Amino acid sequence: MHIALYKPDIPQNTASIIRLGSCLNLKIHIIEPCGFSLEDKRFKRVVMDYIGHSKIFRYEDYDIFLKKNTNSRIILMTTKATKPYYKFKFKKRDILLFGRESAGVPKALHSKIQNKLKVPINKNTRSLNVAMTVAIVASEALRQNNFLKK
């Protein structure tokens, strides 16, 4: 299972997602540019030594990311989707794409991606933290594909 972060801009969130990836054997794809350095002390404080147990791939831009991952479905997680994540059949090679915390993904990119899902939330709130959303959706995708065996 794969997680892709589109131009992440909050170091603590990216670090939490990398740490989650280490624990759940998720491959993490970071589409540059990041809004911070991986040397940022806020990033390092959260990621701790888990970065050494992570499978992280970095790409200069989205086009390169697409070219390197032609055998995977891209699933965009977005508050603008209508379909809830738990009504979707995940496959082992899927890449769950999460937009940047401050702006999501650009409209042009949003319109090109066929599979779009959301985590339903209270109508009086805007969105969940991206790291929380990754944990929720990745857990379901892993469960569906029997990756959470003991």
Image (tube, rainbow, N blue to C red):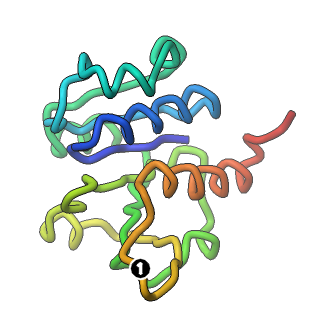
In the image, is 33 to the left or to the right of 92?
left
**In the depicted structure, whether residue 64 falls above or below residue 82:** above
Quadrant holding the N terminus: top right
Q: Estimate the x, y position of residue 8 in percent, counting from the top left.
A: 25, 43
Residue 21, given in percent of the width and then of the height, sits at 54, 33
> Image check: 55 left or right of 1?
left
Residue at image point 45% right, 18% down: 51
Crowding near the residue tagged with mark 1, few <14, some 14–19, many ≥20 C-alpha atoms within 10 Å: few
The three-letter code of the residue at mark 1 reads Thr
Q: In the depicted view, which residue is nearer to us: 80 or 73?
A: 80
| Residue in front for this viewpoint, 1 or 40 | 40
In the structure shown, which secondary structural element does the residue marked by tag 1 occupy?
loop
For the point 37% across and 53% down, which residue is it?
Answer: 97
- Image quadrant of residue 102? bottom left
The answer to which of 19 and 92 lies nearer the viewer is: 19
Q: Is residue 57 left or right of residue 26?
A: left
Which quarter of the picture shows residue 10?
A: top left
Q: Is residue 70 above or below residue 51?
A: below
Q: List x then y, in percent, for residue 59.
A: 22, 31
Quadrant where the C terminus is found in the figure: top right
Pointer 1: what residue?
A: 125
In the rendered view, would you say 116 is above or below 3? Answer: below
Q: Residue at x 44, y 43 (%)?
A: 3
Number of marks present in the image shown: 1
Instruction: Residue 73: give x, y in percent of width and height.
Output: 43, 54
